[in-house]
Amino acid sequence: MSFQQCACHVFAITGYLDDNQMQKVNGLYANYYSSGQVDEGRPRGWSAMNTLATLTAHIRGTTGANATTLPIEIYGGFRPGQLLPEHMWVEYKGWIYDTMPDYDCNGTVANAQTRQLPYLETRPFTERGDEVAHFTSVATVAQLVNIGDASKRKKENIGD
């Protein structure tokens, strides 16, 4: 496998390092809410921003993701009733980066629109009940490598 098999949440939480790490992150993400924690709908006191921050901290702590001191904004887009984000992306140095399986990491200039609708998302998170949450964290080494690869491709595509 390769980065192109990487889910958006793997990139946004820890960055893609290798297939073993990707599988571990996928498992932790999928099992974050056990069936016993939620009877119906969202638990009392649930918030998108808190979920995003605690999910990220839990997965990074469990996997030992190698954090830097460089700030990064982590985003998650939630549809009504979802406990975990449907799509995740990051903002780093004025650019929005996202990915999905079968795609490379893509970068677009950060603005009000791309913060709500990153490049690979086809349906904006602006319908009734949709929510985009974000918080400031620090980038991981793997995220910076993935972002660097996206930046190199962008320069190659425009002839720089």
Image (cartoon, helix red, strand yellow):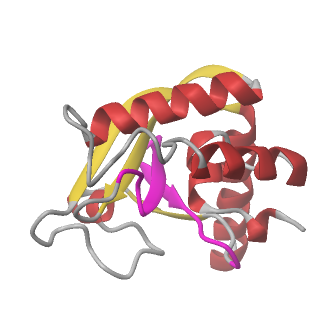
Who's the residue at 31% across and 79% down the image?
Answer: 123
Displayed quadrant of residue 65: top right
Given residues 18 and 98, the one toward you in this image is 18
Q: Is residue 100 above or below residue 75?
A: below
Nearest to the observer: residue 40 or residue 147 = 40
Residue 29 in view, yes or no: yes
Corner quadrant of residue 140: top right
Residue 65 can be seen, yes or no: no
Locate residue 108, reporting x and y percent: 45, 64
Residue 117, image x, y percentages: 32, 68
Residues rendered magenta in the picture: 83-102
Q: How many marks?
A: 0
From what the image shows, is residue 53 above or below residue 86? Answer: above
Q: Is residue 58 left or right of residue 94?
A: right
Q: Nearer the viewer, residue 106 or 55?
A: 55
Residue drawn where x is 65% and y is 51% of the image? 10
Q: Looking at the figure, which quarter contains the C terminus? A: bottom right
In percent of width and height, residue 138 lies at: 54, 25
Residue visible at 16% across and 68% down in the picture: 126
Where is residue 75 shown, x and y percent of the image? 39, 47
Would residue 127 be found to the left or right of residue 41 on screen?
left
Residue at the outermost left position: 128
Task: In the rendered view, tell whether residue 140 sits above or below residue 142.
Answer: above
- Picture quarter with the N terminus: bottom right
Horizontal side of 64 relative to 42 (left or right) equals: right
> Is 118 included in the stretch rendered in magenta?
no
Left or right relative to 137: residue 6: right
